[in-house]
Amino acid sequence: MSAAHAHARSGALPPFANERHLELRRGDVREALLAAGGSLLERLPLSVPVMVGEQHLAAGADGRGELVSPDPGKPRREVARAAMASGRDVDAAVRLAPGGHAEWAARSPQQRAETLIAAACLLRERRLELAALAVYECAKPWLEADADVCEAIDFLEYYARRGLELERDGALAQPPGERNSMRYVARGVVGVIAPWNFPFAIPTGMSAGALAAGNAVVLKPAEQSPACAQEIVSALRSAGVPAAALALLPGDGRAGEALVRHPGVHAIAFTGSCEVGLQIVRAAAETPPAQRHLKRVVAEMGGKNCVIVDSDADLDQAVPAIVRSAYGYAGQKCSAAARVLAHEAIAAQLIERLAGAVRALRVGQADELGIDLGPLIDADAQGRAGVHRGGQRGRARACAGRAARRRVAGRVLRAPDAAERPSGRFALAAGGGVRAGADGGGGARRGERVRCGRRPALRADGRAVQPQPGHDRRGSRAHAGGQPVPEPRDHRGDGRSPAVRRQPPVGHGRQGGRPGLPARVQRAAGGVREHDQTRRGGVSSETRTPAPFVHPLRVRYAECDPQQIVFNANYFAYFDVGMTELWRAAIGSYAEMMRRGVDMVVAEASARFLGAARFDDALQLEVSIARLGRTACTTRHRVLRKGEVLVEGMMRHVFVDPHTLEKLAIPAWLRESLAPWVTGEPGQAEGD
């Protein structure tokens, strides 16, 4: 039993920490990976059945077809033979799922967390073998294959903790004459439609989020990665997820369409192309007579990331960042840089350096150590990677690149001269205006120019390479789902961006992290009157002002004077308790923030005393963030007893480096985590 599993069983989980990637520079690690790959090759082809309840249904039975998953680099090598789920299989899985959902949802959040942690342990024990499977089935280079398995483990660990946090979200204010309660309940059956480019991470994340909330899951993996999906389902079932609560339906698009349209499905989690995603949104909006609920769709869709390089950008930073973003996993990611819009002053130099960097990329089979570019996933992908024709006003000029069979060794193309403009405004508008684009990027130093398109078809992900801080003041005005700074690259080490991808209308959001989980749950409120206490993004889109964070507290004897009245100074300690619990809900713990290089010091505090709390009073501590500036945070506090406000006040904290105590800009990850509780306008106040 691992330490994390032991902690889960004891009821206390350590703060979340990302799984460490393997160090491929070490000879013993490389030898272990190659040995795992050799062992896997001896067992090919793998057999992948349709898994519905306790049944493992093979190809051929009941007219079920067979799907062959080849090695992308060597198509004659069969990695897996999968049974193709039929419409009857989809119906059987969805009809069986409510029983599995009832059994799974009846378990406590602690028990579900234990199961997810146990599944993470199983993946961790077999990470070399699983990485090898990603190499041969999806042509992921060893480094990225290991990172993909690590992220799958991370999702299980993360959602185990998030499920516990949802259970603790029941503290509400209790005005006189009212008794209010709120809890989260699972939606029911969640259909998960996963892509092939992150064959372990994405299907695991979508499934784990749904399972953590108590839902049943019907997983339809991509046609190119059925064997990877089978390993995920097998690990979760072995860890304790009921068979009826987790089904595997390998197959083609017909199985996915049947799953989306089935009236027994309550929510759809999808990652894939824009075209298919919008079809799912439209299909899910239909309500046939047999369906008594509205389906929720969480769709994360592909894009065409554009990197914008301004005249004063640091090319030593921009060039390697662009190359990593564009050519990691052969660019087969929605976050991959596909276009660069450069200022005329540095365009020639940038193109020359990019072309040289691309020529230096090492091309080979995915199972060869040290390569930069492996095979594309299939022949269709190779066809899409080719250059067919130039633009209407001229033809693109190739500066570097070559193609051979299924390996495209990188191309740098210069756009037609008619498309060249010196205006940063034009470049940014063009960068965000591509309909297919979920991701937009920038190599600009001046963030006030970064708008990533005035009128993009759907929201984009903005990016900027900025050598100097403080120039991104207007970046928050960009029409973009996410704006990572300072590089147009991933933040996980595997080439995948955590930022929001293409956002369909009607509020469908991102998959991973805190904003994604509420789509798998719904609130159940009870009391004399109903109060919409939406927090952390919630489920309701009607609440415009976020509710404050609420934490219950019982007055201790040591906090009182001889008359059993609370000392006034102790209310500041109560303020601090509320802050600590808010931080615990937002990022796991205050210690986690310090571990990531951020601390806080109190710069100002005040309180207004309206009443007195006494020994053994049950209090509610309300905390909200009135302002989240560049380096400082102002919080508002209220101490209530049965709805009566006893004390109200404020605290202003300045963020600092824990070692030097120098003022520190609030990191993007922390700002995002705190955003659900910001009741005022985020921005830069005087002195922030």
Image (cartoon, helix red, strand yellow):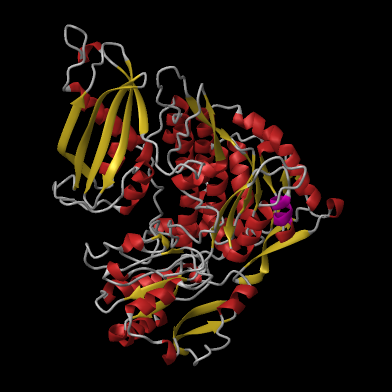
- Please report the bounds of the magenta region as a residue range: 255-261
The x and y percentages for residue 154 are 45, 46
Q: Name the residue located 50 percent from the left edge and 92 percent from the top edge.
A: 393
The x and y percentages for residue 238 are 61, 37
Image vertical order of residue 309 relative to residue 367, above or below: below
* Camera sees residue 234: yes
The x and y percentages for residue 446 are 26, 70
Left or right of residue 405: residue 100: right
Q: Name the residue located 47 percent from the left edge and 30 percent from the top edge.
A: 531
Image vertical order of residue 409 relative to residue 446, above or below: below
Q: Is residue 647 or residue 616 the one in the foreground?
A: 647
Image vertical order of residue 489 relative to residue 547, above or below: below
Left or right of residue 265: residue 658: left
Seen from this angle, which residue lies furthest top? 563
Q: How many marks?
A: 0
Q: Name the residue located 31 percent from the left edge and 13 percent from the top edge.
A: 617
* Camera sees residue 361: no
Report if residue 560 lies within the magenta region.
no
Left or right of residue 264: residue 338: left
The x and y percentages for residue 327 are 45, 72
Q: Is residue 271 or residue 360 the one in the foreground?
A: 271
Q: Name the residue located 73 percent from the left edge and 45 percent from the top edge.
A: 263
Our reading of the magenta stretch's main secondary structure is helix
